[in-house]
Image (cartoon, helix red, strand yellow):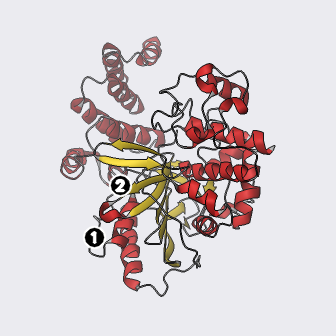
Amino acid sequence: MKKTFFLFAIIGILQTSSFELNAQETTQPTSLFSKIDNYLTAGTKNGFSGAITVVRNGVTIINKGYGIANKETNTGINSNTIFDIGSNTKQFTATAILKLAELDKLKLTDSLNTFFKDLSVDKQSITVHQLLTHSAGFVDALGRDFTQISQKDFFDKVFSSTLLSKPGEKYSYSNVGYSILGRIIELTSGLPYETFLNKHLFIPAGMRQTGYLLPKWNVKEISNSYNRGIIKSESPIFHYKKDKGVNWHLKANGGINSTQNDMLLWFKALKTNKILSEESFKKLITPYIHYSRGKYKYAYAYGWGVRILDNNIKRIAHNGSNGAYSHSLIWFPKKDIYIIYATNANSSKVEFTAYSIAKMILDSKYVPKPIQNNVFSFIFNYTKQHPTNKHKELLAILKEKYSSDFTHAGVLNTIGNLILKSNKNLDWALNLFKSNVQLFPKDGNLWDSLGDGYMANNLQKNAIKSYRKAIELGYTNSQEKLDKLNKN
């Protein structure tokens, strides 16, 4: 399921301005373009792959891609490359709801029993407004993005679920809540969710490469994803085509695909009130519900998060990620700065790169730390470039340079299993598994992986010992493997 993180600010009404969608640098000082460009170009040496767009005072400072969209075809990323934008889908859902309110098809104060029958008492009075602001009390998710489920089964499951809190009581981020909004869009408009968005949002804005299945996708521009730079997956667009639709675990809360240039058109359409009236636009970006994370205070509007930074700088923003793709939108209204960021090789080292760039724009003296190769990619590449007798040197490097990342068993286990899957450097997989059980000797799952490593290297007696140890530590999944070996 999508992972989402918010860093936001209160916003006022934005002034209309012009756009240059394809400009790499313009009349703005070239130093800003160069700073951003040099920073991301250097990052490609450490696995960065993505795109950045920055607009300031109506002028496009940079709109450029970096790295690879498809390693098989060696296709580079550009401003027309198609990315999954994750939970930034929610702003389209929220805008669609406000459009329906303008069309007198619904009211934001309408309750769920206006749209759905036979609801339990605790859910009947939940309002559209509460769904939009993640204050309805629904859980975050009820299944994984591509787990097939019928519309009936999904909503039966949703409306029989236990609420986390009393409706309107507090903020609780919910993908489920936005899927309910998607169904409300269909029920009130008489159109499928994506059809309504296409007709009332995307086409008016000039966005031709945004959606799930309706666009005539430029297939050459669709990016693959490379989780942590090493785990390849096809674009979700191909999942939708195979499944002949988008299931309700994902629909309306995430999974829409778009390009940098289309998201610039979206920004322009919002600012010029091409999609929504000025009054509705105010509602879209007004902070309604406030919450804290540690010492930081946040707020949520409709599909946008809100925050006030130091020096009273106002920011609205939203992020979306499915683990492999990550997408960020950052908007500083008073500064008239808009940032679009996408990556198809997500990791903890690059997920929030847009916020480093925002600091570079706001503070000319700020110099971000160079983008570092994530620990998974580093280990995977190290095993391809060095013989296994260098495994002790690898552990020393990890301890020195990746100590904050190398804190749990999943790192070496993930890489070891990826190597097994590739059926290359199998001795490296075995050495990684051995090191891992030494570091975390009471984890049965790791002993099971060690058994797999021995099996891949045709060391059955050692594999049997490892599987027995895994079972002893409570990892019962090893029993079937052990039984199979004992029969032989």
Task: Report crowding for label 1: few under 14, some 14 to 19, many 20 or more residues within 10 A (C-alpha).
Answer: few
In the image, is 288 to the left or to the right of 383?
right
Residue drawn at 30 percent across, 65 percent down: 311
Residue drawn at 72 percent across, 43 percent down: 106
**Residue 222 in view here:** no
Amino acid type of the residue tagged 2 in the rendering: Lys
Quarter holding residue 146: top right
Residue drawn at 53 percent across, 43 percent down: 133
Quarter holding residue 150: top right
Which residue is identified by label 1?
A: 367
- The one of 389 and 143 positioned closer to us in this rendering: 143
Residue 92, given in percent of the width and then of the height, sits at 63, 53
Which comes before the other along the chain, label 2 or label 1?
2
- The one of 151 and 285 positioned closer to us in this rendering: 285
Secondary structure of the residue carrying tag 1 is loop
Residue 424, given in percent of the width and then of the height, sits at 43, 44
Which residue is identified by label 2?
A: 349
**Where 340 sits versus 113, above or below?**
below
- Label 2, label 1: how far apart the Cα atoms are: 16 Å
